[in-house]
Amino acid sequence: MVILQRVAARRAVACQRLTWVVVWLAFWSVDVRLSAQNLTGSLGVHDPSSIHAVDGRYYLFYTGNRVRAKVSDDLARWSEGPRVFSAPPSWVATSVPNNANGNFWAPDVAYFNGRYHLYYSVSTFGSQDSAIGLATNPTLNPDAANYAWTDHGPVIESNPGSPYNTIDPSIIQTSAGEIWMSFGSYWNGIYMTRIDPLTGKLVARGNSTVRIASTSAIEAPYIHERDGYFYLFVNWGSCCQGVNSTYNIRVGRSTSVSGPYVDRNGVNLVTGGGTLFLGTEGDFIGPGHFSILSAQGDEWFSYHYYNGAANGASRLNLRGVRWTADGWPEAGPAFPVPEPAGAGMAIVGCACLAYGRTCRSSRRRGDSHAGAG
C-alpha cells in the first residue's frame, strides 16, 4: 500500500510539473500569435484606409503617389491595385503648391448615395498648408465597365494659423443616418465635421468643426459605433521614422458621435486622455491608422506597423478586435483566428492521463464543440 501511495504521489507531482509547462507554452503560443504576421503578398502599406468588399474582393487604399491601392480575394494574400489618379488633380497646384508631385496621404473610403467616396490628404511634412480632397467611383472593381474615378476638389482646407491641420480624414456613418468626417494632426488635435450625404462635401448650413481629442502629438482618427457608444481611436507619437517610430493607438468613447470622448479612467481626450489599445510589440513597431472590418464571421482591425526585422519597412497587418465585459476594445489574435481558448487544457488532460488517473482536465465529454447550443 505504501509503495502504491508513493507511486501515485510521484505521478501527481510529475503531472503538476507537466501542467505548468503546458500552460506556459500555451500562453507563450498565444502571445506569439497576437502579434504574428500571417498575411502574404504585397504588404508594403502606410496609412491604410478602411477595407471594403466589392464583387467578392477586398480593397484598401494607402499613402502614395496619386493614391495607391491593394486588393485581396481572402484578406490573407494581397496584391497591388491601380492608382486612383493618372495625374494630380489641377486644384492641388493652387491649394497646396508644395505638393506638386501628387504624393497624397492617409485616404479613407465610404460608400453612400450610390458611390464610393474616397477622401485623401494633400499636404507636406510639418505644414498646415493642407487640404482634404474627394474623389468618387460607382465601384472599386477596376474590371467593372463603370469603373472611373471623378475628382470633386477640396472638401476642407487649412493654412498657417488655422486651428487645425486638414489631413487624415476618416468617415463614420452613424445608425441615425448622419455622416461625419474626423480629421486632424498635431495643431490643437483632432476635429470632426458633418458631411452632406448628397454631395460628399461639408453640410452647407449650420455646420461647425468640433474638437474631440488633443495632445502634443496626435493624428489618424477613426470612429466606430457599437452598442450605444462611439469609440474614437487615435494615434499618439511620431510616424514615418522606421524602427524609431513611436506611434501607438489610443482609444476613448462617448454616447454622442461629437463627444465628449473619455478614456477608461474618465479622462477627456481633449485634455490628454486616451487608453492604450496597441503599442510596439517586438518587431511590430509603431502601429497606426486603425480601422475595423467585419468579415468572415469576425471583427478585425487593419493597421500598419514598422517591421523591425526588415529595417523598419511599413507593412499591413490584420488582428481581431475583442471586447471586454464593460465594453472596451482590446487587440486580439492575428488573422486568422487560432484554435479556441481552452485547447491547452485538453492537452494537459491528455498529458496527465499518460501518467495515470491522478488528475483530470476540467473539460467534460462533449465540450469539444463549444458554442454548439
Image (tube, rainbow, N blue to C red):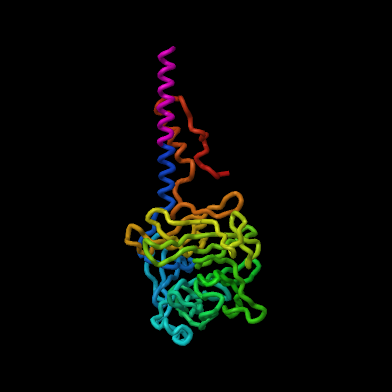
Give the residues drawn in magenta, as a range: 1-21
Place of residue 166 in the rendered image (x, y in percent of width and height, measured from the top left): 52, 76
Place of residue 180 in the rendered image (x, y in percent of width and height, measured from the top left): 59, 71
Rendered residue at 49%/63% (across/down): 236
Q: Is residue 207 above or below residue 19?
A: below
Residue 98, located in which quarter of the rendered image?
A: bottom left
Q: Is residue 308 left or right of residue 152?
A: left
Is residue 52 at least partly visible in the picture? no
Rendered residue at 41%/37% (across/down): 22
Place of residue 67 in the rendered image (x, y in percent of width and height, measured from the top left): 42, 75
**Which residue occupies the extreme top position in the image?**
1
Q: Nearer the viewer, residue 45 or 160?
A: 160
Q: Nearer the viewer, residue 249 or 344?
A: 249
| 108 in magenta | no
Q: Main secondary structure of the magenta part?
A: helix
Q: Nearer the viewer, residue 308 or 118?
A: 308
Q: Quadrant of the N terminus?
A: top left
Q: Quadrant of the C terminus?
A: top right
Q: Is residue 178 left or right of residue 122?
A: right
Q: Is residue 100 above or below residue 274?
A: below
